[in-house]
Image: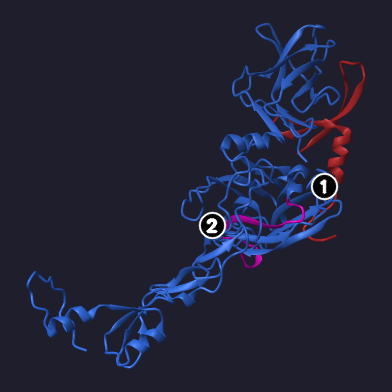
Amino acid sequence: MAAGLGFKTFNTGDVLSAADTNGYLMQGVLVFANAAARDAAITSPQEGQCCYLKDTDAVQTYSGSAWVGFDDSNAIQNSIVDAKGDIVAASGNDTPARLAVGSNGDTLVADSAATTGLIWAKPVASLSNPIVNGGMDIWQRGTSFSSPNTIYVADRWKAEGSTPACTVARQATGDTTNLPNIQYGLRFQRNSGQTNTSTVYLYTGVETANAIPFAGKAITVSFYAKCGANYSSSASALGYFLNSGTGTDENPTGSYTGNVSVASGNVTLTTTYQRFVFTGTIGATATEFKIGFNYTPSGTASTNDWFEVTGVQIDSGTWTASTAPTFRRSGNTLQGELAACQRYYMRLTGGASSSNYGIGYAYNTTSAAINLRNAVTMRITPTVLDYSAIGLTVVGVNNYTITGLAIDAGTSGNDYVILLATGASGLTTGASYSLRNTSNVAGFIGLSAEL
Amino acid sequence: MENIRELFIEMPNGESSTHIIIENGNGHFTSMLKSTYDEMLAAQSTPIDTEDE
């Protein structure tokens, strides 16, 4: 078969020569019902001849020895996919690869560790992060604590760090490279020169209402942590633990009813923030859980014997450090996080020497009952009160020193409290008084409804 | 150094209750019902769970 001559427009009167016929007209694609019909019609195919087979919708060309399909080696071949839902991804430059269909409901997630850089994963959990103040944003009680002996430091986080003497303090992370823009971390430091090597703890409890949604579920705890240059824990280990219980709203200090260790272990810290995860399955009957961190120091503390932690989060499902959902506050916004914290503890800080907190009346000559409206509805009626530099006053007339301030448990509620200010002298029964700072700008009242 | 004292408080309804006043230093105080304080001490007397019982 002669090589084609290209394309020609025939005009009226032109003579159709044999060369034109072979060079133009015979260069087209010949259409046949199937290969058998073609082979019957073309018994001596010529190299370069083309045909179209209607039964398979295939275009073939004759190579000189056989009819072959138009097979572009750079095209994605049909055989690359095997099943409904398979998709074609890439394992590298110019390298297509099959990604088998995921399970119903899965979503496609980028994962650099996977062959194709993609994995099918369960959708990000719709459950909120149950760790209130996991980003260490809220510090109503103060931002630095010396030797905390089983007390709350950052909101919702309790520290046991009195032996050895430790300092727990808020730290600005200043790290927008290794953290997803988390402003603060909690630093737990063994004070320089301390030789005691008892284990110290930092932990938070999740109340029953927030724990039950995770019952029976696989969960992933993610957090960011780093250590100081003189961190004395063996192999720079930071211990973690997650324990569940079957009680209701129990104090995370001590032991839960029906205690079960869901997960525990160690991560290895460096002086740079890293994200870590640990996983476990909350028991089907669990009604509460707590998570925490600990470390056992060694030797004599130098000036940077500390760890920092922030961005603590729990998600349903099993994730890796690279695939775990981005850290999100339990309360989403800063204001929401504050409100979430105030469900457990609410501190009123007037900020002025004459700040008034509430008004009430004297029910005898030494005591007054003061009404206080809570900023949010608290978890329960507050049971613990802390305060400083508080007294009674008739504004502009007189100030009265008190010797005690307490919550009237019988008449207080989640939304309000009645404070009993006692030990004053010379009150007029039935007269109105206000509770205010005693000429001290640092005065405050704190109401606790903690677990 | 903590300074702990009991305080009997007469309430507006004429009943009285026993509170614990803890002086935490720096003029900071913590108060709670004695029953709450006893529960808190009981919890602190048990090591925190970090493993199975």
**Are labels 1 and 2 on one chain?**
no
The residue that appears at 77% across and 56% down in the rendered structure is A216
* Of the pair A295 and A383, the residue shown nearer to us: A383
Mark 2: secondary structure? loop
Instruction: Name the kind of residue labelled 2 in the image.
Output: Tyr
Residue, disc 1: B44
Query: Relative to residue A292, is residue A157 depicted above or below?
Result: above
The residue that appears at 8% across and 78% down in the rendered structure is A15
Q: Is residue A217 magenta?
A: yes
Q: Which stretch is magenta?
A: A214-236
Check the rendered structure and report the hue given to chain A: blue
Q: Specify whether residue B48 is in view.
A: no
- Give the side of residue A274 with respect to residue A361, left or right: left
- Give the side of residue A113 with respect to residue A427, left or right: left
Query: Relative to residue A60, is residue A132 depicted above or below?
Result: above
- Give the side of residue A220 with respect to residue A423, left or right: left
Disc sitting over residue A422 in the figure:
none
Q: Verify CB contact (< 8 Å) between mark 1 and mark 2.
A: no
Instruction: Name the kind of residue labelled 1 in the image.
Output: Gln
- Name of the residue lying farthest toward the left: A13
Pick the quarter of the image with the N terminus of chain A. bottom left
Residue, disc 2: A273
Image position, residue A395 (x, y; %): 67, 9
Image position, residue A134 (x, y; %): 63, 47
Quadrant hosting residue A37: bottom left
Pick the quarter of the image with the C terminus of chain A. top right
Give the alpha-carbon distance from disc 1 to disc 2, as whole Å. Answer: 32 Å
Mark 1: secondary structure? helix
Q: Chain of mark 1?
A: B
* Of the pair A171 and A6, the residue shown nearer to us: A6
Which chain is displayed in red in the rendered image? B
Quadrant hosting residue A441: top right
